[in-house]
Image (tube, rainbow, N blue to C red):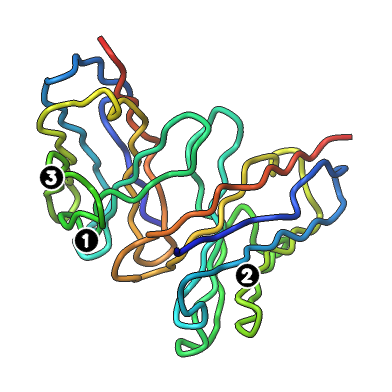
């Protein structure tokens, strides 16, 4: 079964850091770009960023709202994608979803994790 | 950055009725990179349509997508009880973005 499982969410103070993990199973992880999408309480979906597969350079792109503060990385040997979040702000409070796919992916973002909740509050 | 707008914001319909949801882009989107997602309360989004008109695996044929350029449409031919949800369009070309969503609720 194709599956993504996020972990690492929790309560964190403004200005602090948090790292989320996305563990994949059921497919060849290294062949795919991976994205992070977030959803603030009661709001819509916001693309956060993605990391391309190694075949496409493993490069990353980010939304303007997180650029310079968030970093996406991947460990293909462990089938894990990471979202390192630094200098967190209260407006980063959201459910964070890991998804399979990135820019120009043929099938769009076709697999989603269940999400992990990040709350930024003092 | 491509900005997507969706209309209407809320669509109130009865089971069995036809739903037509609109997604408009601020600039042309390659049809290959336009998707629709369904989200129910407390759940992750689910891919319905990719490439503007291709149904994802396991999606019933009452869901159909169409459009090109800056105007795209998701049609649900006959609403089933499980179809009442929020629907998002997304362009997944350069710097992916989502529309604000259309809520389909029971009239």
Mark 2 in CB contact with mark 3 (< 8 angstroms): no
| CA separation in Å, label 1 and label 2 | 25 Å
Residue A31: image location, x then y, percent? 45, 82
Which callout, 2 or 3, points to the residue nearer the camera?
3
Q: Is residue A96 above or below residue B100?
A: below
Q: Residues within 10 Å of mark 3 (few under 14, many from 20)?
A: few
Mark 1 in CB contact with mark 2 (< 8 angstroms): no
* Picture residue at 61% right of the left edge, 31% below the top: A41
SS of the residue under disc 2:
strand
Residue B56: image location, x then y, percent? 25, 56
Residue carrying label 2 = A81
* Picture residue at 79% right of the left edge, 40% below the top: A120
Which callout, 1 or 2, points to the residue nearer the camera?
2
Q: Is residue B50 left or right of residue A117?
A: left
* Picture residue at 79% right of the left edge, 44% below the top: A10
Please identify the quadrant where the N terminus of chain B is shown: bottom left
Residue A2: image location, x then y, percent? 45, 64
Q: Is residue B66 above or below residue A27?
A: above
Q: Residues within 10 Å of mark 1 (few under 14, many from 20)?
A: many
Query: Which residue is nearer to you in this view: B39 or A3?
Result: A3
Please identify the quadrant where the C terminus of chain B is shown: top left
* Picture residue at 48% right of the left edge, 29% below the top: B41
Q: Is residue B47 above or below residue B32?
A: above
Quarter location, residue B15: top left
First-in-chain label (1 vs 3):
1
Residue A17 in view here: yes
- Kindly identify which chain the residue marked by label 1 belongs to: B
Which residue of the protein is positioned furthest toward the top in this rendering?
A: B107
Residue A63 in view here: no
Q: Residues within 10 Å of mark 2 (few under 14, many from 20)?
A: many
Residue carrying label 3 = B61
Residue carrying label 1 = B51
């Amino acid at each position: 079964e194709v599956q993504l499982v996020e972990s690492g969410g929790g309560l964190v103070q403004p200005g602090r850091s948090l790292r989320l993990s996305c563990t994949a199973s059921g497919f060849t992880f290294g062949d795919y770009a991976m994205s992070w999408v977030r959803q603030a309480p009661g709001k819509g979906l916001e693309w956060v960023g993605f990391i391309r597969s190694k075949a496409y350079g493993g490069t990353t792109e980010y939304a303007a709202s997180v650029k310079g503060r968030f970093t996406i990385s991947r460990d293909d040997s462990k089938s894990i994608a990471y979202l390192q979040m630094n200098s967190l702000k209260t407006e980063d409070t959201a459910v964070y979803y890991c998804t399979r796919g990135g820019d120009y992916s043929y099938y769009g973002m076709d697999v989603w994790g269940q999400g992990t909740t990040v709350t930024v509050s003092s | 950055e491509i900005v997507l707008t969706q209309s209407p914001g809320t669509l109130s319909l009865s089971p069995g009725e036809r739903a037509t949801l609109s997604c408009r882009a601020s600039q042309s989107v390659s049809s290959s990179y336009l998707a629709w997602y369904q989200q129910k309360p407390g759940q992750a989004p689910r891919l319905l349509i990719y490439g503007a008109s291709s149904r994802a695996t396991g999606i019933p044929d009452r869901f159909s997508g169409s459009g090109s350029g800056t105007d795209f449409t998701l049609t649900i031919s006959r609403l089933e009880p499980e179809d009442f949800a929020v629907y998002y369009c997304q362009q997944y070309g350069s710097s992916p973005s989502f529309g604000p969503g259309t809520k389909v609720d029971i009239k």
